[in-house]
Protein backbone atom coordinates (compact mmCIF):
# COMPACT_ATOMS: atom_id res chain seq x y z
CA UNK A 1 0.00 0.00 0.00
CA UNK A 2 1.13 3.56 -0.69
CA UNK A 3 2.10 5.70 2.34
CA UNK A 4 0.00 8.21 4.25
CA UNK A 5 1.54 11.66 3.70
CA UNK A 6 1.50 13.88 6.81
CA UNK A 7 2.09 17.62 6.40
CA UNK A 8 2.57 19.69 9.56
CA UNK A 9 5.21 22.13 10.81
CA UNK A 10 4.72 20.75 14.34
CA UNK A 11 7.19 17.90 14.85
CA UNK A 12 5.25 16.44 17.78
CA UNK A 13 2.08 16.08 15.68
CA UNK A 14 4.03 14.34 12.92
CA UNK A 15 5.74 12.01 15.43
CA UNK A 16 2.51 11.01 17.18
CA UNK A 17 0.63 10.30 13.94
CA UNK A 18 3.57 8.38 12.45
CA UNK A 19 3.85 6.06 15.46
CA UNK A 20 0.09 5.51 15.72
CA UNK A 21 -0.26 4.70 12.00
CA UNK A 22 2.78 2.42 11.96
CA UNK A 23 1.22 0.42 14.82
CA UNK A 24 -1.78 -0.05 12.53
CA UNK A 25 0.46 -1.28 9.71
CA UNK A 26 0.04 1.92 7.69
CA UNK A 27 3.25 3.32 6.14
CA UNK A 28 3.84 7.07 6.44
CA UNK A 29 5.89 9.90 4.94
CA UNK A 30 6.16 13.31 6.61
CA UNK A 31 6.64 16.86 5.35
CA UNK A 32 6.99 20.21 7.12
CA UNK A 33 5.36 22.48 4.50
CA UNK A 34 3.27 22.41 1.28
CA UNK A 35 6.25 23.19 -0.95
CA UNK A 36 7.93 19.91 0.01
CA UNK A 37 4.71 18.02 -0.83
CA UNK A 38 4.39 19.56 -4.28
CA UNK A 39 8.06 18.84 -5.02
CA UNK A 40 7.57 15.20 -3.95
CA UNK A 41 4.51 14.93 -6.21
CA UNK A 42 6.57 16.26 -9.14
CA UNK A 43 9.24 13.62 -8.53
CA UNK A 44 6.84 10.74 -7.82
CA UNK A 45 6.32 8.22 -10.58
CA UNK A 46 2.95 6.74 -11.52
CA UNK A 47 1.58 4.86 -8.50
CA UNK A 48 4.17 6.37 -6.11
CA UNK A 49 2.02 9.14 -4.67
CA UNK A 50 0.17 9.12 -1.35
CA UNK A 51 -2.73 6.86 -0.40
CA UNK A 52 -4.12 9.66 1.81
CA UNK A 53 -2.91 13.18 2.52
CA UNK A 54 -3.25 14.60 6.07
CA UNK A 55 -2.39 18.30 6.16
CA UNK A 56 -2.34 21.10 8.69
CA UNK A 57 -4.19 24.23 7.57
CA UNK A 58 -1.74 26.95 8.69
CA UNK A 59 1.98 26.45 8.15
CA UNK A 60 4.96 28.70 7.42
CA UNK A 61 5.44 28.90 3.68
CA UNK A 62 1.94 27.92 2.61
CA UNK A 63 -1.67 27.17 3.46
CA UNK A 64 -3.20 23.73 3.74
CA UNK A 65 -6.23 24.97 1.75
CA UNK A 66 -3.96 26.14 -1.11
CA UNK A 67 -2.24 22.75 -0.99
CA UNK A 68 -5.65 21.07 -1.11
CA UNK A 69 -6.53 22.95 -4.31
CA UNK A 70 -3.24 22.07 -6.01
CA UNK A 71 -3.29 18.42 -4.96
CA UNK A 72 -6.92 17.97 -6.04
CA UNK A 73 -6.06 19.42 -9.46
CA UNK A 74 -3.44 16.68 -9.90
CA UNK A 75 -5.08 13.81 -8.00
CA UNK A 76 -8.85 14.41 -7.90
CA UNK A 77 -9.56 11.03 -6.29
CA UNK A 78 -7.08 11.43 -3.40
CA UNK A 79 -8.73 11.74 0.05
CA UNK A 80 -7.34 14.80 1.87
CA UNK A 81 -7.89 15.34 5.62
CA UNK A 82 -7.47 18.93 6.81
CA UNK A 83 -6.48 19.42 10.48
CA UNK A 84 -6.14 22.69 12.37
CA UNK A 85 -6.04 24.19 15.82
CA UNK A 86 -8.13 27.09 14.51
CA UNK A 87 -11.60 25.51 14.55
CA UNK A 88 -13.56 28.24 12.83
CA UNK A 89 -16.49 27.90 10.46
CA UNK A 90 -14.77 29.58 7.49
CA UNK A 91 -11.89 27.08 7.55
CA UNK A 92 -14.26 24.12 7.72
CA UNK A 93 -16.43 25.41 4.89
CA UNK A 94 -13.39 26.21 2.74
CA UNK A 95 -11.97 22.75 3.35
CA UNK A 96 -15.14 20.96 2.25
CA UNK A 97 -15.68 23.28 -0.72
CA UNK A 98 -12.15 22.43 -1.82
CA UNK A 99 -12.98 18.72 -1.78
CA UNK A 100 -11.53 17.67 1.58
CA UNK A 101 -12.44 14.18 2.76
CA UNK A 102 -12.83 15.34 6.38
CA UNK A 103 -12.01 18.23 8.71
CA UNK A 104 -10.09 17.33 11.92
CA UNK A 105 -9.88 20.00 14.64
CA UNK A 106 -6.94 19.98 17.06
CA UNK A 107 -6.43 18.73 19.70
CA UNK A 108 -7.81 15.44 18.43
CA UNK A 109 -8.40 12.07 20.03
CA UNK A 110 -5.67 9.85 18.54
CA UNK A 111 -7.76 6.64 18.11
CA UNK A 112 -10.48 8.68 16.39
CA UNK A 113 -7.89 10.32 14.13
CA UNK A 114 -6.49 6.89 13.18
CA UNK A 115 -10.02 5.58 12.52
CA UNK A 116 -10.68 8.60 10.27
CA UNK A 117 -7.48 7.96 8.33
CA UNK A 118 -8.51 4.29 8.06
CA UNK A 119 -11.81 5.37 6.48
CA UNK A 120 -9.92 7.62 4.09
CA UNK A 121 -7.65 4.69 3.11
CA UNK A 122 -10.70 2.53 2.41
CA UNK A 123 -12.21 5.32 0.31
CA UNK A 124 -8.95 5.66 -1.62
CA UNK A 125 -8.83 1.92 -2.30
CA UNK A 126 -12.45 1.94 -3.48
CA UNK A 127 -11.56 4.80 -5.82
CA UNK A 128 -8.62 2.83 -7.22
CA UNK A 129 -10.83 -0.21 -7.85
CA UNK A 130 -13.43 1.98 -9.59
CA UNK A 131 -10.76 3.54 -11.83
CA UNK A 132 -9.36 0.10 -12.68
CA UNK A 133 -12.83 -1.17 -13.53
CA UNK A 134 -13.45 1.83 -15.76
CA UNK A 135 -10.10 1.27 -17.47
CA UNK A 136 -10.93 -2.40 -18.00
CA UNK A 137 -14.45 -1.67 -19.24
CA UNK A 138 -14.90 -2.46 -22.93
CA UNK A 139 -15.49 0.38 -25.36
CA UNK A 140 -18.89 -1.14 -26.21
CA UNK A 141 -21.13 -3.41 -24.16
CA UNK A 142 -23.64 -5.92 -25.43
CA UNK A 143 -24.53 -9.59 -24.99
CA UNK A 144 -27.62 -9.46 -27.19
CA UNK A 145 -27.37 -11.41 -30.46
CA UNK A 146 -27.93 -8.22 -32.49
CA UNK A 147 -24.94 -6.56 -30.79
CA UNK A 148 -22.79 -9.65 -31.22
CA UNK A 149 -23.49 -9.38 -34.96
CA UNK A 150 -22.26 -5.77 -34.84
CA UNK A 151 -19.08 -6.81 -33.01
CA UNK A 152 -18.41 -9.54 -35.56
CA UNK A 153 -18.88 -7.05 -38.39
CA UNK A 154 -16.41 -4.64 -36.77
CA UNK A 155 -13.92 -7.50 -36.52
CA UNK A 156 -14.33 -8.41 -40.19
CA UNK A 157 -13.93 -4.78 -41.25
CA UNK A 158 -10.94 -4.13 -38.98
CA UNK A 159 -8.32 -4.53 -41.71
CA UNK A 160 -10.34 -2.88 -44.46
CA UNK A 161 -10.48 0.70 -45.71
CA UNK A 162 -13.91 0.24 -47.25
CA UNK A 163 -16.55 2.96 -46.77
CA UNK A 164 -19.15 2.05 -44.15
CA UNK A 165 -22.69 3.32 -43.65
CA UNK A 166 -24.01 2.98 -40.07
CA UNK A 167 -27.78 3.18 -39.65
CA UNK A 168 -29.75 3.30 -36.43
CA UNK A 169 -31.93 5.48 -34.27
CA UNK A 170 -30.59 8.59 -32.54
CA UNK A 171 -28.73 7.74 -29.34
CA UNK A 172 -28.06 4.12 -30.29
CA UNK A 173 -24.27 4.58 -30.35
CA UNK A 174 -23.39 5.11 -34.01
CA UNK A 175 -20.35 7.24 -33.22
CA UNK A 176 -19.07 4.56 -30.83
CA UNK A 177 -19.20 2.05 -33.67
CA UNK A 178 -17.39 4.49 -35.96
CA UNK A 179 -14.66 5.00 -33.35
CA UNK A 180 -14.33 1.24 -32.90
CA UNK A 181 -13.96 0.76 -36.65
CA UNK A 182 -11.21 3.39 -36.65
CA UNK A 183 -9.46 2.05 -33.53
CA UNK A 184 -9.21 -1.49 -34.93
CA UNK A 185 -8.21 -0.44 -38.46
CA UNK A 186 -4.76 0.14 -40.00
CA UNK A 187 -5.52 3.87 -39.61
CA UNK A 188 -5.70 3.67 -35.79
CA UNK A 189 -2.59 5.88 -35.42
CA UNK A 190 -4.15 8.56 -37.62
CA UNK A 191 -6.76 11.14 -36.57
CA UNK A 192 -10.43 10.41 -36.03
CA UNK A 193 -12.45 13.48 -37.03
CA UNK A 194 -16.22 13.61 -36.44
CA UNK A 195 -18.68 16.16 -37.79
CA UNK A 196 -22.45 16.30 -37.43
CA UNK A 197 -23.69 17.64 -40.75
CA UNK A 198 -27.12 18.42 -39.28
CA UNK A 199 -25.70 20.63 -36.52
CA UNK A 200 -23.83 23.09 -38.77
CA UNK A 201 -25.61 25.82 -40.78
CA UNK A 202 -25.64 25.23 -44.51
CA UNK A 203 -23.57 28.36 -45.22
CA UNK A 204 -20.76 27.15 -42.94
CA UNK A 205 -20.82 23.43 -43.67
CA UNK A 206 -18.84 23.66 -46.92
CA UNK A 207 -16.05 25.58 -45.17
CA UNK A 208 -16.12 23.11 -42.26
CA UNK A 209 -15.70 20.16 -44.61
CA UNK A 210 -13.25 21.53 -47.15
CA UNK A 211 -11.67 24.57 -45.47
CA UNK A 212 -11.27 28.03 -46.97
CA UNK A 213 -8.61 30.41 -48.23
CA UNK A 214 -7.96 33.81 -46.74
CA UNK A 215 -10.46 36.35 -48.04
CA UNK A 216 -12.77 33.70 -49.50
CA UNK A 217 -15.71 35.39 -47.78
CA UNK A 218 -16.37 38.10 -45.21
CA UNK A 219 -14.66 37.15 -41.96
CA UNK A 220 -12.20 34.71 -43.55
CA UNK A 221 -9.11 36.52 -42.29
CA UNK A 222 -6.86 33.46 -42.35
CA UNK A 223 -6.59 30.21 -44.28
CA UNK A 224 -8.40 27.35 -42.56
CA UNK A 225 -8.01 23.60 -43.06
CA UNK A 226 -11.25 21.68 -43.34
CA UNK A 227 -12.21 18.36 -41.77
CA UNK A 228 -11.06 16.37 -44.80
CA UNK A 229 -7.54 17.79 -44.47
CA UNK A 230 -7.56 17.33 -40.70
CA UNK A 231 -8.50 13.64 -41.17
CA UNK A 232 -5.71 12.95 -43.68
CA UNK A 233 -4.29 9.49 -42.96
CA UNK A 234 -7.18 8.70 -40.63
CA UNK A 235 -10.98 8.49 -40.54
CA UNK A 236 -13.69 11.09 -41.16
CA UNK A 237 -17.03 10.34 -39.51
CA UNK A 238 -19.97 12.12 -41.19
CA UNK A 239 -22.87 11.88 -38.75
CA UNK A 240 -26.48 12.49 -39.90
CA UNK A 241 -25.41 12.42 -43.53
CA UNK A 242 -29.05 12.31 -44.58
CA UNK A 243 -29.39 15.99 -43.60
CA UNK A 244 -26.57 17.21 -45.84
CA UNK A 245 -27.70 19.95 -48.29
CA UNK A 246 -28.21 18.67 -51.83
CA UNK A 247 -25.60 20.94 -53.49
CA UNK A 248 -22.92 19.85 -51.02
CA UNK A 249 -23.70 16.22 -51.77
CA UNK A 250 -22.25 16.78 -55.24
CA UNK A 251 -18.94 18.02 -53.82
CA UNK A 252 -18.81 15.13 -51.39
CA UNK A 253 -19.40 12.64 -54.22
CA UNK A 254 -16.40 14.08 -56.09
CA UNK A 255 -14.12 13.71 -53.05
CA UNK A 256 -15.24 10.11 -52.49
CA UNK A 257 -14.57 9.36 -56.17
CA UNK A 258 -10.94 10.50 -56.43
CA UNK A 259 -9.95 12.05 -53.11
CA UNK A 260 -9.48 15.53 -54.59
CA UNK A 261 -11.19 18.76 -53.49
CA UNK A 262 -10.70 22.53 -53.36
CA UNK A 263 -10.87 24.82 -50.37
CA UNK A 264 -13.59 27.48 -50.54
CA UNK A 265 -12.06 30.31 -52.58
CA UNK A 266 -9.10 28.14 -53.55
CA UNK A 267 -7.71 27.25 -56.98
CA UNK A 268 -5.24 24.50 -56.14
CA UNK A 269 -6.51 20.96 -55.84
CA UNK A 270 -5.84 19.10 -52.58
CA UNK A 271 -5.75 15.34 -52.15
CA UNK A 272 -6.59 13.72 -48.84
CA UNK A 273 -6.17 10.07 -47.92
CA UNK A 274 -9.28 9.65 -45.80
CA UNK A 275 -11.55 6.75 -44.93
CA UNK A 276 -15.16 7.94 -44.71
CA UNK A 277 -17.68 6.43 -42.31
CA UNK A 278 -21.18 7.86 -42.57
CA UNK A 279 -24.17 7.50 -40.27
CA UNK A 280 -27.85 8.38 -40.37
CA UNK A 281 -31.07 7.71 -38.51
CA UNK A 282 -33.07 8.33 -41.70
CA UNK A 283 -34.28 5.94 -44.40
CA UNK A 284 -31.92 7.02 -47.20
CA UNK A 285 -33.68 4.90 -49.83
CA UNK A 286 -36.85 6.86 -49.12
CA UNK A 287 -34.87 10.13 -49.20
CA UNK A 288 -33.56 9.14 -52.64
CA UNK A 289 -37.10 8.44 -53.89
CA UNK A 290 -38.22 11.82 -52.58
CA UNK A 291 -35.35 13.58 -54.35
CA UNK A 292 -33.69 14.78 -51.14
CA UNK A 293 -30.58 12.62 -51.48
CA UNK A 294 -28.43 11.82 -54.52
CA UNK A 295 -28.75 8.23 -55.61
CA UNK A 296 -25.13 8.04 -56.84
CA UNK A 297 -23.87 9.35 -53.47
CA UNK A 298 -26.08 6.83 -51.67
CA UNK A 299 -24.49 3.94 -53.57
CA UNK A 300 -21.01 5.40 -53.02
CA UNK A 301 -21.58 5.52 -49.25
CA UNK A 302 -23.56 2.31 -48.97
CA UNK A 303 -20.67 -0.07 -49.72
CA UNK A 304 -21.05 -1.84 -46.35
CA UNK A 305 -24.13 -1.15 -44.27
CA UNK A 306 -24.04 -1.75 -40.54
CA UNK A 307 -27.36 -1.54 -38.72
CA UNK A 308 -27.21 -0.71 -35.02
CA UNK A 309 -30.19 -2.08 -33.04
CA UNK A 310 -32.32 0.13 -30.82
CA UNK A 311 -32.01 -0.50 -27.08
CA UNK A 312 -35.56 -1.92 -26.90
CA UNK A 313 -34.37 -4.63 -29.34
CA UNK A 314 -31.58 -5.65 -26.92
CA UNK A 315 -33.27 -5.43 -23.53
CA UNK A 316 -30.94 -8.08 -22.10
CA UNK A 317 -28.14 -5.48 -22.28
CA UNK A 318 -29.96 -2.95 -20.06
CA UNK A 319 -28.61 -4.55 -16.85
CA UNK A 320 -24.91 -4.41 -17.83
CA UNK A 321 -25.24 -0.94 -19.37
CA UNK A 322 -27.00 0.42 -16.28
CA UNK A 323 -24.32 -0.78 -13.90
CA UNK A 324 -21.60 0.50 -16.24
CA UNK A 325 -23.16 3.97 -16.51
CA UNK A 326 -23.74 4.17 -12.73
CA UNK A 327 -20.04 3.49 -12.16
CA UNK A 328 -19.09 5.95 -14.86
CA UNK A 329 -21.28 8.78 -13.57
CA UNK A 330 -20.10 8.19 -9.98
CA UNK A 331 -16.50 8.50 -11.09
CA UNK A 332 -17.24 11.69 -13.01
CA UNK A 333 -19.00 13.23 -9.99
CA UNK A 334 -16.42 11.98 -7.49
CA UNK A 335 -18.92 10.03 -5.39
CA UNK A 336 -19.38 6.39 -4.38
CA UNK A 337 -21.06 4.32 -7.06
CA UNK A 338 -24.67 3.45 -6.30
CA UNK A 339 -26.07 -0.06 -6.57
CA UNK A 340 -29.42 -0.87 -8.13
CA UNK A 341 -31.95 -3.43 -6.97
CA UNK A 342 -33.07 -6.01 -9.49
CA UNK A 343 -36.67 -4.86 -9.15
CA UNK A 344 -35.56 -1.46 -10.45
CA UNK A 345 -33.47 -3.12 -13.17
CA UNK A 346 -36.48 -5.18 -14.24
CA UNK A 347 -38.57 -2.03 -14.44
CA UNK A 348 -35.89 -0.29 -16.50
CA UNK A 349 -35.69 -3.21 -18.91
CA UNK A 350 -39.44 -2.84 -19.63
CA UNK A 351 -38.97 0.79 -20.67
CA UNK A 352 -38.84 1.40 -24.43
CA UNK A 353 -36.04 4.01 -24.32
CA UNK A 354 -37.00 6.25 -27.24
CA UNK A 355 -33.63 7.97 -26.73
CA UNK A 356 -31.82 4.59 -26.69
CA UNK A 357 -28.47 4.14 -24.93
CA UNK A 358 -27.96 7.90 -24.57
CA UNK A 359 -31.24 8.14 -22.65
CA UNK A 360 -30.21 5.27 -20.35
CA UNK A 361 -26.90 7.02 -19.69
CA UNK A 362 -28.76 10.24 -18.81
CA UNK A 363 -31.08 8.31 -16.47
CA UNK A 364 -28.05 6.84 -14.67
CA UNK A 365 -26.59 10.33 -14.22
CA UNK A 366 -29.95 11.46 -12.84
CA UNK A 367 -30.10 8.51 -10.42
CA UNK A 368 -26.55 9.12 -9.21
CA UNK A 369 -27.55 12.65 -8.20
CA UNK A 370 -31.20 12.23 -7.19
CA UNK A 371 -31.62 8.74 -5.69
CA UNK A 372 -31.83 9.19 -1.89
CA UNK A 373 -29.84 6.10 -0.83
CA UNK A 374 -26.93 3.96 -2.03
CA UNK A 375 -29.32 1.24 -3.26
CA UNK A 376 -31.61 2.43 -6.04
CA UNK A 377 -35.12 1.04 -5.65
CA UNK A 378 -37.91 0.97 -8.23
CA UNK A 379 -39.59 3.94 -6.54
CA UNK A 380 -36.45 6.03 -7.18
CA UNK A 381 -36.65 5.73 -10.97
CA UNK A 382 -37.56 8.81 -13.06
CA UNK A 383 -41.29 9.53 -13.56
CA UNK A 384 -41.32 8.55 -17.24
CA UNK A 385 -40.01 5.07 -16.37
CA UNK A 386 -42.48 4.60 -13.51
CA UNK A 387 -45.40 5.73 -15.68
CA UNK A 388 -44.66 3.02 -18.24
CA UNK A 389 -44.20 0.43 -15.47
CA UNK A 390 -47.60 1.35 -14.06
CA UNK A 391 -49.18 -0.01 -17.25
CA UNK A 392 -47.02 -3.14 -17.32
CA UNK A 393 -48.12 -6.34 -15.52
CA UNK A 394 -45.94 -7.29 -12.55
CA UNK A 395 -43.82 -10.48 -12.82
CA UNK A 396 -45.80 -13.61 -11.96
CA UNK A 397 -43.29 -15.24 -9.61
CA UNK A 398 -41.84 -13.59 -6.51
CA UNK A 399 -38.14 -12.77 -6.38
CA UNK A 400 -35.78 -13.59 -3.48
CA UNK A 401 -34.24 -10.80 -1.46
CA UNK A 402 -31.01 -11.03 -3.48
CA UNK A 403 -33.05 -9.87 -6.48
CA UNK A 404 -34.37 -6.82 -4.65
CA UNK A 405 -31.21 -5.53 -3.07
CA UNK A 406 -27.63 -6.24 -4.11
CA UNK A 407 -25.85 -8.06 -1.31
CA UNK A 408 -22.22 -8.99 -2.05
CA UNK A 409 -21.77 -12.75 -2.15
CA UNK A 410 -24.25 -15.59 -2.37
CA UNK A 411 -25.42 -17.20 0.87
CA UNK A 412 -26.51 -20.87 0.97
CA UNK A 413 -30.20 -21.02 1.77
CA UNK A 414 -29.64 -23.24 4.80
CA UNK A 415 -27.20 -20.72 6.34
CA UNK A 416 -29.40 -17.66 6.00
CA UNK A 417 -30.89 -16.13 9.14
CA UNK A 418 -34.61 -15.76 9.73
CA UNK A 419 -36.60 -13.50 7.44
CA UNK A 420 -36.94 -9.81 8.13
CA UNK A 421 -38.93 -9.35 11.38
CA UNK A 422 -42.54 -8.31 10.96
CA UNK A 423 -44.54 -6.14 13.34
CA UNK A 424 -45.11 -9.14 15.61
CA UNK A 425 -41.38 -9.90 15.98
CA UNK A 426 -39.24 -8.79 18.87
CA UNK A 427 -36.48 -6.21 18.49
CA UNK A 428 -33.80 -8.47 20.00
CA UNK A 429 -30.85 -9.43 17.75
CA UNK A 430 -31.16 -12.80 16.07
CA UNK A 431 -29.17 -15.66 17.50
CA UNK A 432 -26.16 -16.66 15.38
CA UNK A 433 -26.86 -19.67 13.22
CA UNK A 434 -30.62 -19.10 13.08
CA UNK A 435 -32.16 -21.03 10.18
CA UNK A 436 -35.53 -21.71 8.61
CA UNK A 437 -35.16 -19.00 5.96
CA UNK A 438 -37.88 -18.82 3.34
CA UNK A 439 -37.25 -16.84 0.16
CA UNK A 440 -40.92 -16.08 -0.30
CA UNK A 441 -41.15 -14.61 3.20
CA UNK A 442 -38.69 -11.82 2.38
CA UNK A 443 -40.10 -10.78 -0.97
CA UNK A 444 -41.90 -8.01 0.85
CA UNK A 445 -39.12 -7.12 3.27
CA UNK A 446 -39.71 -3.44 2.57
CA UNK A 447 -43.40 -3.88 3.37
CA UNK A 448 -42.41 -5.65 6.57
CA UNK A 449 -40.11 -2.76 7.43
CA UNK A 450 -42.88 -0.28 6.72
CA UNK A 451 -45.32 -2.24 8.89
CA UNK A 452 -42.83 -2.49 11.75
CA UNK A 453 -42.06 1.24 11.54
CA UNK A 454 -45.75 2.14 11.58
CA UNK A 455 -46.30 -0.08 14.64
CA UNK A 456 -43.44 1.53 16.57
CA UNK A 457 -44.47 5.03 15.54
CA UNK A 458 -48.06 4.39 16.54
CA UNK A 459 -46.84 3.18 19.94
CA UNK A 460 -45.24 6.59 20.47
CA UNK A 461 -41.62 5.41 20.43
CA UNK A 462 -39.06 8.14 19.81
CA UNK A 463 -36.09 5.90 18.93
CA UNK A 464 -37.55 4.15 15.88
CA UNK A 465 -34.54 5.01 13.72
CA UNK A 466 -32.05 3.51 16.18
CA UNK A 467 -34.15 0.39 16.85
CA UNK A 468 -34.70 -0.50 13.18
CA UNK A 469 -31.19 0.47 12.13
CA UNK A 470 -29.69 -1.83 14.77
CA UNK A 471 -31.86 -4.71 13.62
CA UNK A 472 -31.04 -4.11 9.94
CA UNK A 473 -27.30 -3.89 10.63
CA UNK A 474 -27.45 -6.99 12.85
CA UNK A 475 -29.17 -8.95 10.08
CA UNK A 476 -26.75 -7.79 7.42
CA UNK A 477 -23.59 -8.49 9.43
CA UNK A 478 -24.80 -11.90 10.64
CA UNK A 479 -25.68 -12.93 7.09
CA UNK A 480 -22.23 -11.88 5.85
CA UNK A 481 -20.50 -13.71 8.72
CA UNK A 482 -22.49 -16.86 8.02
CA UNK A 483 -21.50 -16.61 4.39
CA UNK A 484 -17.80 -16.27 5.26
CA UNK A 485 -17.97 -18.84 8.12
CA UNK A 486 -17.16 -16.19 10.72
CA UNK A 487 -14.21 -14.57 8.92
CA UNK A 488 -14.67 -10.91 9.81
CA UNK A 489 -12.22 -9.33 7.36
CA UNK A 490 -13.72 -11.25 4.44
CA UNK A 491 -17.22 -10.30 5.59
CA UNK A 492 -16.19 -6.63 5.81
CA UNK A 493 -14.79 -6.76 2.25
CA UNK A 494 -18.01 -8.29 0.93
CA UNK A 495 -20.13 -5.70 2.74
CA UNK A 496 -17.92 -2.87 1.49
CA UNK A 497 -16.97 -1.63 4.96
CA UNK A 498 -13.69 -1.46 6.87
CA UNK A 499 -12.24 -4.05 9.22
CA UNK A 500 -12.43 -1.67 12.16
CA UNK A 501 -16.00 -0.76 11.27
CA UNK A 502 -17.29 -4.34 11.34
CA UNK A 503 -15.44 -5.02 14.63
CA UNK A 504 -16.96 -1.92 16.20
CA UNK A 505 -20.43 -2.78 14.91
CA UNK A 506 -20.23 -6.34 16.25
CA UNK A 507 -19.39 -4.95 19.69
CA UNK A 508 -22.05 -2.23 19.58
CA UNK A 509 -24.76 -4.64 18.42
CA UNK A 510 -23.83 -7.38 20.89
CA UNK A 511 -23.06 -9.94 18.18
CA UNK A 512 -19.88 -11.31 19.77
Image (cartoon, rainbow, N blue to C red):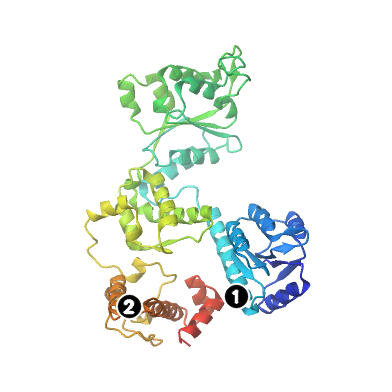
C-alpha separation, residue under disc 2 versus residue under disc 1:
31 Å
Q: Is residue 291 left or right of residue 327?
A: left
On the image, the x and y values in percent for residue 305 come to 40, 33
Q: Which mark is residue 115?
A: 1
On the image, the x and y values in percent for residue 52 come to 65, 65
Taking the image as drawn, is residue 422 in sight? no
> Going 46% across and 47% down the picture, which residue do you hit?
140
> Going 65% across and 75% down the picture, which residue do you hit?
108
> Going 40% across and 59% down the picture, which residue do you hit?
371
Sequence-first disc among 2 and 1? 1
Q: Quadrant of residue 121?
A: bottom right
Q: Is residue 105 above or below residue 298?
A: below
Q: Which residue is mark 2?
A: 420
Q: Is residue 352 above or below residue 89?
A: above
Q: Is residue 13 above or below residue 348?
A: below
As drawn, the residue found furthest toward the top would be 267
Taking the image as drawn, is residue 363 in sight? yes
Q: Quadrant of residue 381?
A: bottom left
> Going 22% across and 53% down the picture, which residue do you hit?
391
On the image, the x and y values in percent for residue 9 come to 77, 67
How many residues crowd mark 1 within 10 Å: few (<14), some (14–19), many (20+)?
A: some
Q: Is residue 396 left or right of residue 17?
A: left
How many residues crowd mark 2 within 10 Å: few (<14), some (14–19), many (20+)?
A: many
Q: Is residue 312 left or right of residue 202?
A: left
Amino acid sequence: MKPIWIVDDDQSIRFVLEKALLREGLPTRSFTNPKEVLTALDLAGEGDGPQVLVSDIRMPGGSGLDLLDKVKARLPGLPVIIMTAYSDLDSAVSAFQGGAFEYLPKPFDLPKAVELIRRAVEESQREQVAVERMAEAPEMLGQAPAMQDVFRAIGRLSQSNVTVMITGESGSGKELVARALHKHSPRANGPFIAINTAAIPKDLLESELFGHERGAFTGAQTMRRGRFEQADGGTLFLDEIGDMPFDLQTRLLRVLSDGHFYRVGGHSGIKANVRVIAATHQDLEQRVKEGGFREDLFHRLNVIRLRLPALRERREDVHALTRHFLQQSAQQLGVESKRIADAALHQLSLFDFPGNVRQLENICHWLTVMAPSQVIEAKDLPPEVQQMAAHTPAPASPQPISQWIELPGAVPAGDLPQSWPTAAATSAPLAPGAQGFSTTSVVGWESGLESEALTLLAAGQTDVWDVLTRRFESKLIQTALLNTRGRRIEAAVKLGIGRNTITRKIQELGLE
